[in-house]
């Protein structure tokens, strides 16, 4: 499968009617603002700054599509749950994300990112339930695992697995690259025909 280095930005959509037609099976990255969606996407494709990463939450403000050849497109979604984003903007992003998730034939699955240290929020749960009602497969990436001490990792991961109604929780880090190979396996299985 085409991967490292040959990813390219295809399009960004800030409104539902600007979502481009799919050219390949897609896997989307969703989760709270600042959880590390764009960073993990960059790490997966081995490119430092393909998707823009931010110090402040709310960095990704549109749906960004990155093609990896003709076999797979990775989709970076805006984050949710950031208190400082004005309500009308949040609503706009929510409608945009829903328009994408609900109408996308090509969508093979969604990687839902949660911060390994912080655990699961109500909004994470809502998203996972929503994906289930849409019958969109998902897996959870417990990211920023590099920030947890070895001794805390197992405890946090067990807690996450207990709290979440998903089959797979992958511990990973965009910083260290840990778990990235396992995440690729999860992504591959979501788009396998
Ligand atoms: N230590 C550590 N920091 C990370 C990791 N992933 C992301 N970060 C940092 O977390 C911050 C947010 O990263 P982004 O990738 O922009 O997060 P995002 O989820 O795309 O954020 P929005 O676009 O605002 O929704 C940046 O300062 C990253 O450097 C990780 O695995 N480990
Ligand atoms: Mg982002």
Image (cartoon, rainbow, N blue to C red):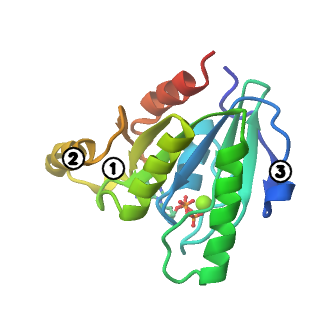
> What residue did someone put label 1 on?
145
Q: Is residue 147 above or below residue 28?
A: below
Real-space Cα separation, disc 3 to disc 2, in angstroms: 37 Å
Marks 1 & 2, CB-CB < 8 Å contact: yes
135 or 166: nearer the eye? 135
Few, some or many C-alpha atoms within 10 Å of disc 1 (few <14, some 14-19, many ≥20)? many
Dividing the image into four quarters, tell me where ligand 2 lies.
bottom right
Mark 3 lies on a secondary structure that is: strand
Comparing labels 1 and 3, the label whose residue is closer to the camera: 3
Say whether disc 3 or disc 2 marks the residue closer to the N-terminus.
3
Few, some or many C-alpha atoms within 10 Å of disc 3 (few <14, some 14-19, many ≥20)? some
Position in image of residue 185 (x %, y %): 48, 24
Few, some or many C-alpha atoms within 10 Å of disc 2 (few <14, some 14-19, many ≥20)? some
Mark 1 lies on a secondary structure that is: helix
Q: Is residue 71 above or below residue 124?
A: above
Q: Is residue 54 above or below residue 142?
A: below
Is 114 situated left or right of 10 in this image? left
Position in image of residue 7 (x %, y %): 74, 37
* Quadrant assignment, res 14: bottom right
Comparing labels 3 and 2, the label whose residue is closer to the camera: 3
Can residue 16 be spotted in the picture? Answer: yes
Say whether disc 1 or disc 3 marks the residue closer to the N-terminus.
3
- The residue shown at (39%, 39%) is 178
> What residue did someone put label 2 on?
153
Say whether disc 1 or disc 2 marks the residue closer to the N-terminus.
1
Q: Is mark 1 within 8 Å of ligand 1?
A: yes
Position in image of residue 36 (x %, y %): 50, 57
> What residue did someone put label 3 on?
11
Real-space Cα separation, disc 1 to disc 3, in angstroms: 30 Å
């Amino acid at each position: 499968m085409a991967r490292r280095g040959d990813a390219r930005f295809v399009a960004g959509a800030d409104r539902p009617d600007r979502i481009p037609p799919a050219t390949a099976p897609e896997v989307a990255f969703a989760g709270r603002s600042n959880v590390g969606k764009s960073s993990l996407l960059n790490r997966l494709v081995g490119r430092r700054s393909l998707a823009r990463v931010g110090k402040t939450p709310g960095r990704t403000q549109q749906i960004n599509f990155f093609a990896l050849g003709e076999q797979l497109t990775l989709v970076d979604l805006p984050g949710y749950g950031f208190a400082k984003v004005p309500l009308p903007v949040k609503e706009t992003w929510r409608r945009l994300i829903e328009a994408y998730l609900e109408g996308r034939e090509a969508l093979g699955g969604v990687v839902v990112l949660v911060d390994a240290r912080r655990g699961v929020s109500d909004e994470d749960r809502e998203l996972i339930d929503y994906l289930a009602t849409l019958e969109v497969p998902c897996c959870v990436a417990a990211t920023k695992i590099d920030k947890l001490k070895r001794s805390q990792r197992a405890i946090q991961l067990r807690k996450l697995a207990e709290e979440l109604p998903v089959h797979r929780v992958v511990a990973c880090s965009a910083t260290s690259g840990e778990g990235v190979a396992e995440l690729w396996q999860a992504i591959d299985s979501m788009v396998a025909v």
